[in-house]
Image (tube, helix red, strand yellow):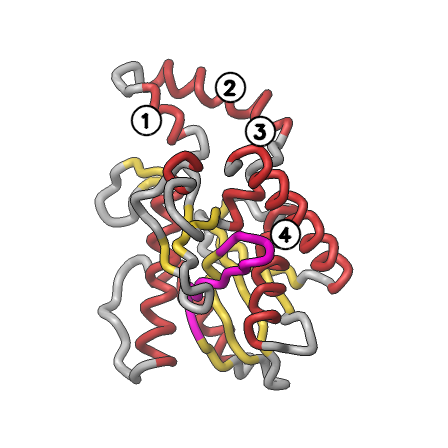
Amino acid sequence: MAHFYDCTDVSDPEFEGEITTPAQAKKKTKVYPSVTTVLGIVKDAFLDSIYKPRMITSLARDFPHLAWQDIERLTYGTREHPITGDTIESSEFGTTVHKVIEEHVDYGFLYSDQQPESSVWDEWALPFLEWIQAEGVKPIACEKIVASNRIKIAGSVDFIGHDSDGQLFLADYKCRTNTKGKAKTYPKDCQQLAIESFMLMKEHGLNYLPACRSVVIDCDTKKHHHRDWSEKEMQLGIKVAKKCAELYWLLRMK
């Protein structure tokens, strides 16, 4: 599903939850696609031609009562809900972990010393929070939306903080399995963070590109692994994201 933001005020973009297609977005002024949406214009050959068809076939056999749309949503994986034991989409699992981290950062660091109520979900969030404290990181915002009129895209940054040297940096967390002791990352992880870092740099008039870290949360072990992207990797990521945005607007938004 595509995501869009109302960028009428580019300094304060708003998520447009009711707009899910380019056709709907074109009916409004200054509604921009999300970073992940434009990056999705370039398909993963293995994912689309091999993995996804296999998953659809397997799911259709295991869940014959499900509608096609439900089966398609499940192709990206399922997890067991840690409280109810129900089978849920992997995306729902990840979204919940994101919300728990955001709540702890908001109430534990940004707004008050009061922590949210404890939950079994804390087990997936605590390693990141412990890292913040251990490294002396000063949180600034969670789920900060950044946008660009020039590139015509917008995105939500999971975490923005000041490092020990006082410079801005970004972090994005992903819930994945089988990390085998290291961060299981992909080029699109870098591309997403890099273009968001670029937009943040422009927004704040910085003379440096904020550093970026991908945090991979192992769904099974609850351990956190990370990868810090190099300047060279980020510069390439920015170029790729810009080209994807150009292609998306050419093919989807004209």
Mark closer to the chain start, 1 or 3? 3
Q: Is residue 82 above or below residue 106?
A: above
Report whether 162 appears left or right of 211. left
Disc 2 designates what residue? 54
Q: CA distance from mark 2 to mark 3?
A: 10 Å
The label number, if any, that marks residue 191 in the structure image: 4
Residue 31 drawn in magenta? no
Q: Kindly identify the amino acid type of the residue bearing the numbered disc 4.
A: Gln
Disc 1 designates what residue? 70
Residue that appears at 39% across and 55% down: 6
Provide the secondary structure element on which disc 3 rests: helix
Q: CA distance from mark 4 to mark 1?
A: 29 Å
Residue in the foreground of this view, choosing between 3 and 79: 3
Magenta residues (range): 141-154
Q: CA distance from mark 1 to mark 3?
A: 18 Å
The image shows residue 192 at horizontal and vertical percentages of 58, 53
Q: Kindly identify the amino acid type of the residue bearing the numbered disc 1.
A: Asp
Q: Kindly identify the amino acid type of the residue bearing the numbered disc 3.
A: Leu
The label number, if any, that marks residue 47 in the structure image: 3
